[in-house]
Amino acid sequence: MNLLRDSQLMILSFLLVISGLSLQAQTYHMAWSAGLGSFSYNKGTDIINPLEELDIAFPFESSSRDFGLQFTYTPPKAFMSMVGGLHYTDRQIGEGGLSYLRVPLGTDINVGNGWFYPKLGVGVFGSALIKYTDGISEEFLETNRIFQFGIYFNAGFGLRFSSRFSSEFLFRQYADMTPMYSREYRSSPNPASNLSVEELRGGDGLLVVRLLFRIRSSNPH
């Protein structure tokens, strides 16, 4: 658990540094994003490494869709932006579906100021289950967690069409650090007596299109 605590402190310290830089002149953007990809389970129980055993292979066996509204601000002459927003994520699992509201908070790294720029991002998110449809297993209904916490990262590139408008094309990975639900199973060689509990976490691998529009640029001096 020390690794988890240290990683959380590093993320918090990093975000505080970016917040301090924001006391200078700031550039604000509004962004809309839409993503389509695959959903899969992490069947491990290691909360430190939520990507362990996570299958993000294509084509999609279970699909995931994500729609978001974000706000960003960038300090002057900085290559990092702070990002927050609200996302709606829909996970289709077989004949059933799960719908979540997500609140991500993270940092984007923009490399270069030209019309083409590489893009990296990392952050954390909280989510809440708001709806499920028929076809979800009884185990999920009995043991599901409404609120979850996780991490995300994305990588891709952007195209800057003007000083006010740009678009980005990203691969984004969400990974739950807290379980979606748990289930019981019996293992060999004595299935009758070897009863175990398995915690399942989810992950979404998405191809994302993001549109950004500069809404304000201010200088306190």
Image: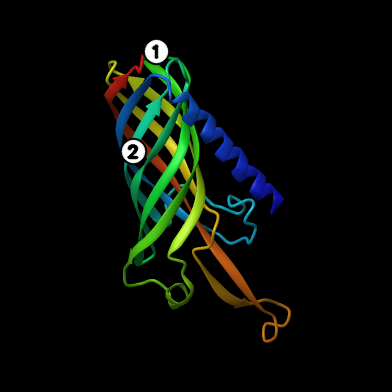
User: Along the horizontal axis of the image, is 14 left or right of 135?
Assistant: right
Q: Is residue 148 above or below residue 187?
A: above
Amino acid carrying label 1: it is Gly
| Image x and y of residue 131, in percent | 32, 65
Q: Earlier in the sequence, mark 2 or mark 1?
A: 2
Q: Measuring 42% from the left and 75% from the top, which residue is drawn there?
A: 141
Q: Which residue is mark 2?
A: 70
Q: Measuring 27% from the left and 20% from the top, which residue is drawn there?
A: 164
Q: Measuring 35% from the left and 22% from the top, which residue is drawn there?
A: 27
Q: Which residue is mark 1?
A: 114
Q: Quadrant of residue 156?
A: top left
User: Along the horizontal axis of the image, is 12 left or right of 188?
Assistant: left
| Image x and y of residue 142, in percent | 45, 77
User: Along the horizontal axis of the image, is 105 left or right of 10?
Assistant: left
Q: Is residue 8 above or below residue 101?
A: above
| Image x and y of residue 146, in percent | 43, 65
| Image x and y of residue 152, in percent | 49, 43
Amino acid carrying label 2: it is Gln
Q: Measuring 52% from the left and 35% from the top, which residue is drawn there?
A: 15
